[in-house]
């Protein structure tokens, strides 16, 4: 069992594994909304425990994954969100992260993490792979930015 993984259902084909830069300003959100009507469910699986919120549109999936990756790369502790709602808490120290349930414990107390000392490069890879799948899937809806 892996410490952390991301599952998107229905599965999104990973068309381009060489995505290095995601520029959300290149997307035609109106065209995506008109043409990609299927709802997708994202689940964070932490030591076998499935954490999910509800199915949503593909652009929300893209934005959630992109935001999480930016926060992890910036080494910022944060509430992990799905559809804008906090579902987990990630506490980052140096090159590791602890993941907790998104609850408010009594002041001065912290419950045991769902996953402890997860290597940040592992988390970055997991988010980058999922983000790349969504980004490549939406390739037909990207436009070139004018300079």
Image: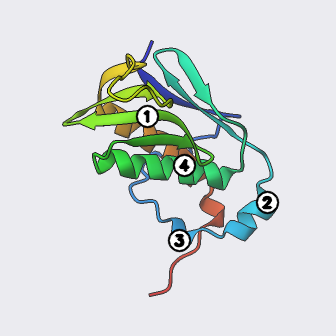
Specify few, some or many for label 3: CA neighbours under 10 Å numbering under 14, 14-19, or 20 or more. Answer: few
Q: CA distance from mark 3 to mark 1?
A: 28 Å
Q: Point out residue 92 in the picture as x, y percentages from the top left corner.
A: 28, 36
Q: Point out residue 142 in the picture as x, y percentages from the top left corner.
A: 59, 67
Eyeballing the image, is 109 above or below 66?
Answer: above
**Nearest to the observer: residue 125 or residue 19:** 125
Q: Which residue is mark 3?
A: 25
Tell whether 47 sits left or right of 33: left
**Nearest to the observer: residue 69 or residue 88:** 88
Q: CA distance from mark 1 to mark 2?
A: 34 Å
Q: Point out residue 93 in the picture as x, y percentages from the top left corner.
A: 22, 35
Q: Which residue is mark 4?
A: 64
**Nearest to the observer: residue 89 or residue 34:** 89
Evaluate if marks 1 and 2 touch, with contact meaning CB atoms under 8 Å apart.
no
| Residue at disc 4, secondary structure | helix
Q: CA distance from mark 2 to mark 4?
A: 20 Å
Q: Quadrant location of residue 98?
A: top left
| Residue at disc 1, secondary structure | strand
Q: Quadrant of the N terminus?
A: top left
The residue depicted at 21 percent of the width and 35 percent of the height is 95
Tell whether 5 sits left or right of 15: left
Q: Which mark is residue 35?
A: 2
Q: Which residue is mark 1?
A: 89
Q: CA distance from mark 3 to mark 2?
A: 18 Å
Q: Nearer the viewer, mark 4 or mark 3?
A: 4
């Amino acid at each position: 069992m892996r410490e952390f993984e991301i599952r998107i259902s229905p599965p999104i084909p990973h068309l381009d594994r060489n995505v290095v830069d995601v520029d959300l300003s290149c997307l035609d959100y109106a065209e995506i909304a008109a043409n990609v009507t299927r709802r997708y469910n994202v689940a964070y699986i932490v030591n076998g425990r499935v954490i999910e919120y509800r199915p949503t549109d593909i652009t929300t999936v893209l934005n959630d994954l992109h935001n999480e990756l930016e926060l992890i790369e910036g080494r910022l502790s944060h509430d992990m969100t799905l559809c804008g709602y906090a579902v987990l808490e990630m506490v980052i120290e140096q090159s590791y992260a602890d993941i907790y349930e998104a609850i408010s414990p009594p002041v001065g107390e912290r419950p045991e993490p769902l996953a402890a000392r997860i290597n940040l490069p592992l988390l970055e890879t997991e988010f980058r792979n999922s983000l790349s799948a969504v980004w490549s899937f939406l390739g037909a809806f990207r436009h070139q930015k004018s300079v």
